[in-house]
Image: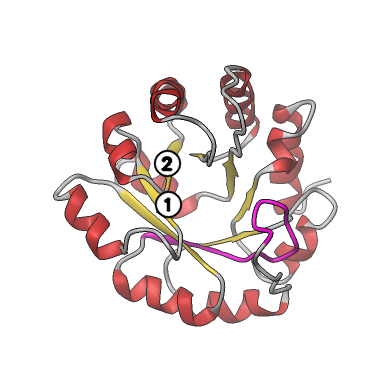
Amino acid sequence: MNWKKERLKNFKLYAITDLKVEDLQILIKIKKALQGGVDVVQLRSKMLSDSALLGLGKEIRRITQKLKKLFIVNDRVDLMLAIDADGVHLGQDDLSIGIARRMIKNRDKIIGCSTHSIKQATQAEREGADYIGFGPIFETPTKPTYQSIGLNQIGQVMAKVRIPVVCIGGINRFNISKVVDAGAKRVAVVRAIFSASDPYRAALQLKGLMNHEK
């Protein structure tokens, strides 16, 4: 098993950017977060130009390859291929998993899918997703139109699908233990790492809380 497949099988902490403007400081934050324990980083921005995303993506690719961590691009299969990232993450309103697979062809790439119900989660698995995001668990400004689904469905979705389930939505150091206690094995965060003054320490703390370390 190569390191990418091993990482996909065993990852716990997934960090997502939410860039409003081009800021090269994000590269420093990403490196620190990865060194602190983040296993997967996703480049996400609804604001940046393609050229800005391409430039940042190439640098993130270099950092993640050096540290042997997974790099996922949000929404854009074309950008993922141009950067040679490890995979793409699709939302419910993006390209279907099947179309994304055809675009990727025989390349060894990961496809993740956002899901907001157990029905969507099982459907994504049937369609060939490698992992799913499940949430929002709590209310979050990054998904303002989605109602939080709470903790109760975590155990249900874990029992229904066999691919990795990443719980997402408003998770931070104050509530991550509740998410883990509800059955989550993997979590994704945005502000809890990239809005922190020290992304290294934030990642280290979150990873420790997931492992029930003090």
Q: Nearer the viewer, residue 156 or 114?
A: 114
Residue 89: which disc?
Answer: 1
Please tell me which residue is depicted at 26% across the width and 55% down the height of the picture.
100
Compared with 116, 204 (above or below) is above
In percent of width and height, residue 121 lies at: 47, 74
The stretch in magenta equals 130-144
As shown in the figure, which amino acid type bears the numbered disc 1?
Answer: His
For label 2, the residue is: 73
Q: Is residue 1 visible?
A: yes
* Left or right of 105 in this view: 205: right
Q: Residues within 10 Å of mark 1 (few under 14, many from 20)?
A: many
Q: Cβ–Cβ below 8 Å for labels 2 and 1?
A: yes
Q: Quadrant of residue 31?
A: top right
In percent of width and height, residue 56 lies at: 46, 23
Q: Residues within 10 Å of mark 2 (few under 14, many from 20)?
A: many
Compared with 58, 102 (above or below) is below
Residue 189: which disc?
Answer: none
In percent of width and height, residue 163 lies at: 42, 66
Q: Is residue 90 magenta?
A: no
Mark 2 vs mark 1: which is more N-terminal? 2
